[in-house]
Image (cartoon, rainbow, N blue to C red):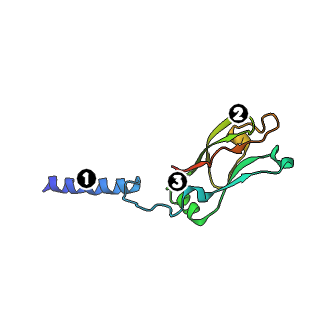
Amino acid sequence: MKLTGKFIGFVIMTISFSSFAGGGSSSWKPSVDPSACVNINEQRTPSTWYDNPVWFTWNANPECEKAISSGYASGIRIMGTVSYVPESTISQFNKVLKPNMSLTIVDLDIYGAVNGHPPRFASRPEFRWES
């Protein structure tokens, strides 16, 4: 009888600890793609592109905010490549954007210009939920 009681107590504790530690079976996932949480800015005007030709800002979409507040993600990982046409120089970036934050070219560790040519996205950046 004592052994059965200890076993039941152990099972209850294990279930309790796993649900507190996030081990429960939460199947909720954001209904939006991570890209919906990011505003992409790419300046095309020569008078402004030296200041900030490429940058990302957080989009306070309610579903994005829920993904953060629920603990599903801590932010959005952004990976991409910029080129300096007609130059053959490229720069790659891989950074995490979090709520109420922006990423500028300085934050992305990319050049502001190469021989007077501003960076342009070589292809659409890739966006992933960051845990």
On screen, 94 above or below 67? above
Q: Mark 3, residues whose alpha carbon is within 10 Å: few (<14), some, or many (≥20)?
A: many
Residue at the image position 49 percent from the left and 56 percent from the top: 72
Q: Which mark is residue 89?
A: 2
The amino acid marked with disc number 1 is Phe
- Regarding mark 3 in the picture, which secondary structure is present there? loop
SS for callout 1: helix
Q: Residue furthest bottom?
A: 62
* Disc number placed over residue 73 in the picture, else none: 3
Q: Going 59% across and 56% down the picture, which residue do you hit? A: 35
Amino acid type assigned to the residue bearing label 3 in the image? Ala
131 vs 19, nearest the viewer: 131
Closest to the camera, between mark 1 and mark 3, is 3
Residue topped by disc 1: 10
Q: Looking at the image, is mark 2 or mark 3 earlier in the sequence?
A: 3
Label 1 Cα crowd, 10 Å radius (few <14 / some 14-19 / many 20+): few
Question: On the image, which quarter does residue 27 sit in?
Answer: bottom left
Q: Residue at x 20, y 53 (%)?
A: 7
Residue 44, percent across and down? 79, 51
